[in-house]
Image: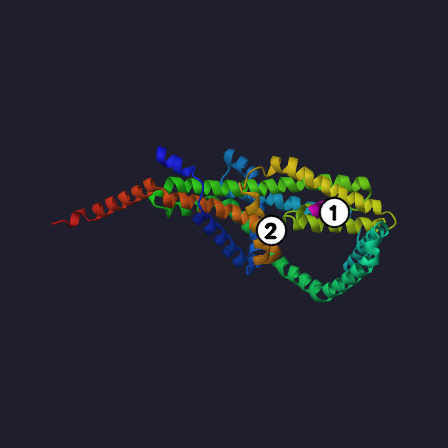
Amino acid sequence: MHDYAGSAQQASGPVVWSGIIAATCALLLVLQHMLWLAIPFLLAIILYYLLLPPMQRLLRLGMSQGAAALLVGGCFTVAVALGALALNLWLPAPSVSWQDMLARYVGGGLDFVRGLLRALEDKFPLLRDMHLSQVVDAQFAAYMEDFMQSHLTAIVVSVAGWLPALLLAPFLTFFFLRDGHLFKKFLARAVPNAFFERTLCLLHEVDQTAHAYFQGMLKLTVLDTAVLAFGLWAIGVSSPVMLGLIAAVLAWVPYVGSIVGCCMVVMVASTDAPGAPLVAYSAIGVFILVRLLDDFVFMPLTLGRSLHMHPLITVLMIFIGGSVAGVAGLMLVLPLLGVVMVVGETLGRLITNPRLRARHRNAKALREKQASADLAV
């Protein structure tokens, strides 16, 4: 027993980690071609871990698994419907189309960048001699024209194609809540008895890793939304709650999402106050403050050490996920790597543990001896 406990605490070697990274990349490559299923599946997992605590309370009160899943799912559906209705009644109908609104905000952002570049040229004559503002302005105009013509329509069509698949999310969530424990038992029954104990630990660790990550992300999103909304409201940016929520959700994509959210808020701030660049600068300051709060306060309180990954591996896998599966890879790589890491490390400990392998060989020999006992002459 002492040898087994010591082996469980050993760090995984390069072979195991090579398998973990390779398996993560392979899964990302598969998910890239199955986004219609991967996105609702991810949403269903997030909803599952969001609704799991109230369902567990109902189970402790004596309610059956099916009844508890139905009650929790029904209450959540009613709450979402009422929230959507209240939001629809509260928000005024837009007076312009979304294309005109997008063009207006992009124009406001470009005006802010032009003003910033002109200010830099006034401070640094070398930049003025290089005609920095004119060069950057021409490149921006060429890129935006190409983006509008070549990419925007494709993005809108792709998002519209995913919307029907999102209806799978509540359906999957209900069956995760109702039959998730049966799936765990199904997996456990396929494991040899010698490895059964560690396999139960494997299933528990995978569940706890995903539980900690997704619930931590939801708590972090709520905190980021509240702080961003308060900061944007304080500096006078319009729709602070909506912008704070969108920016907090975009922050699920590490690094890139925060940059996109900051650019979005700066565009809105510069459009709302075209003659006051201080508002846009203040919006950037709010984002920097929220990032610092995330790193030193919010993340330790919510995500904590749920994934136990070295920062170097985290950054490398983010770049690998983006190159393998695009934006979906950026969103999925860290939770997927966390689960694959737990599975790979535990399987590595199982396979390399001499005591467990000896127990398995002994149990197999005993079963063969028992099966052939009545065949002896």
Region of the chain picked out in magenta, as a range:
242-247
* Magenta span: chief secondary structure: helix
Closer to the chain start, of discs 2 and 1, is 1
Determine whether, in the image, residue 304 is placed left or right of residue 127: left
Q: Position of residue 130 (x, y in %)?
A: 81, 59
Q: Residues within 10 Å of mark 2 (few under 14, many from 20)?
A: many
> In front: 147, or 209?
147
Query: Label 1 is placed on what type of residue?
Result: Leu
Determine whether, in the image, residue 336 is placed left or right of residue 279: left
Above or below, 5 relative to 114: above
> In front: 23, or 374?
23
Nearer the camera: disc 2 or disc 1: 2
Disc 2 target residue: 331
Q: Quadrant of residue 366?
A: top left
Above or below, 196 relative to 141: above
Above or below, 118 relative to 205: below
Name the mark on residue 272. Answer: none
Determine the residue located farthest toward the left in the rendered image: 377
Q: Give the secondary structure at mark 2.
A: helix
Residue 170 visible somewhere in the drawing: no
Q: Give the secondary structure at mark 1.
A: helix
Q: Position of residue 313 (x, y in %)?
A: 55, 47
Q: Was residue 45 drawn as part of the magenta stretch in this picture? A: no
